[in-house]
Amino acid sequence: MTSLQDQLLKAGLIDGKKAKQIGKDKRKQNKVAKKSSQPQLDETKLAVEQARAEKVAKDRELNAERNALAEQKAIAAQIKQLIATNKQPKGGGDIAYNFTFDKKIKKIYVSADVQAHLIAGRLVIAGLDDKFELVPRVIAEKITERNPAMIIQAPVQTQPDLEDDPYADYQIPDDLMW
């Protein structure tokens, strides 16, 4: 088997002097490299290592994105399960209970007992796929930990100052509906 240098000599592409000079230069480089005890930097090895490092970084980033997406799906499934297992009946009443969801006014029809529980804060409205379900406050707090946008916050009722109320002496009729 002949070397590339011998083949080039036979083909006439290089002459003997040039071949000897190339061999001499190569031996000098090897001798200098051994004496200097510094490893020769191979550009191809550096390029391969750099490409490998970039690929590893890119793979890590893609895995982080996949993990985040999987975590979001798991949280959504947990919320859906919490609502499905703990939803309370609306009572089948004819009283419209209005609330805001996504900057729109929505309403659900509930019974008087359920309306009282909603006003008192014992029941909370949870939005799930354009449907609204009633869940207990404890479950609503668990859902809020996972995704606060799923829970419709009931308006905070403040107690009026009874001392300065000019209408404190007047009685409110029971049949008054708002």
Image: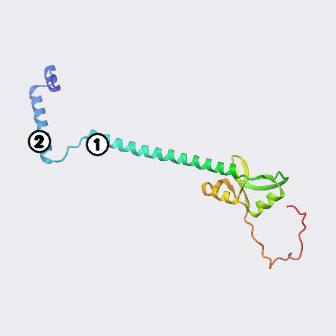
Q: Amino acid at mark 1?
A: Leu
Q: Amino acid at mark 2?
A: Lys
- Pick the residue in front: 117 or 155: 117
On the image, numbered disc 2 is attached to which residue?
31
* CA distance separating discs 1 and 2: 23 Å
**Rendering quarter of residue 51:** top left
User: What residue is shown with label 1?
Assistant: 46
User: Residue 171: x percent and y percent?
Assistant: 89, 72
Q: Position of residue 147 (x, y in %)?
A: 62, 54
Q: Which of disc 2 and disc 1 is earlier in sequence? A: 2
115 w.r.t. 51: above or below: below
Please state the total of marks drawn on the protein image: 2
The spot of residue 18 in percent (x, y) is: 11, 29
Residue farthest along the top direction in this orientation:
11
The quadrant holding residue 19 is top left
From the viewer's perspective, is residue 22 above or below residue 67? above
Q: Secondary structure at mark 2?
A: helix
Circle 1 Cα neighbour tier, 10 Å, few/some/many (<14 / 14–19 / ≥20): few
